[in-house]
Amino acid sequence: MDMDLPLGADAVSIVRRVEMVEYVLERAIALPGLRRKVGLDAVVGLVPVAGDVVSAVLGMYLVWEARNLGMSKWQLARMTANVGVDTLLGAIPLVGDLFDFMFRSNSRNLKMIRKHIDRHHPHARVIEG
């Protein structure tokens, strides 16, 4: 993944930033022996309270960028709810850590952003290969 941070306010730059943040939060670290990757969200979630707060703040960054793309209040509320569920259930000792491993709120939110991009900013469309 190209890690150059696009700084523009255009849809293409926003999508690239959101994809980069989602990758770091959800899929940047390969776990030996498992066919699943984790990210910063699951790792910092292991630190009680502070880790969950950091994860929530980083997750809300995606919601903020979605707002910059002009997503509806309903979509933003759904994205915020994803972050909220991830934060609240992720805060439960042990069970929450497993939940963080399975429930990827940032990936869910990226999917919503991509749908919005496809409909409203087709020039910024992401072609997955």
Image (spheres, rainbow, N blue to C red):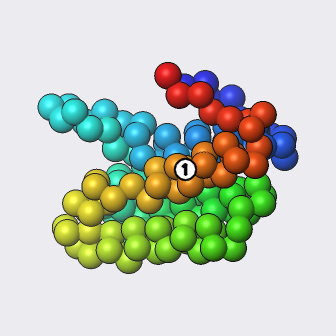
Q: Is residue 93 left or right of residue 43?
A: left
Count neighbours of disc 1 (C-alpha within 10 A) and say few if under 14, some if 14 to 19, many if 20 or more.
Answer: many
User: Residue 115 location in percent, x, y?
Assistant: 60, 49
User: Residue 65 location in percent, x, y?
Assistant: 70, 56
**Does any portion of residue 48 appear in the rendered image?**
no
Q: Report the number of discs.
A: 1
User: Residue 47 location in percent, x, y?
Assistant: 34, 64
Q: Is residue 78 left or right of residue 97?
A: right
Quarter of the image that includes the N terminus: top right
Report the residue at 68% width, 29% height from top: 4
| Relative to 79, residue 84 above or below | below
Give the farthest residue toward the right: 9
Residue underneath mark 1: 110
Say which amino acid is labelled 1.
Answer: Leu
Quadrant of the image occupied by residue 20: top right
Report the residue at 33% width, 69% height from top: 90
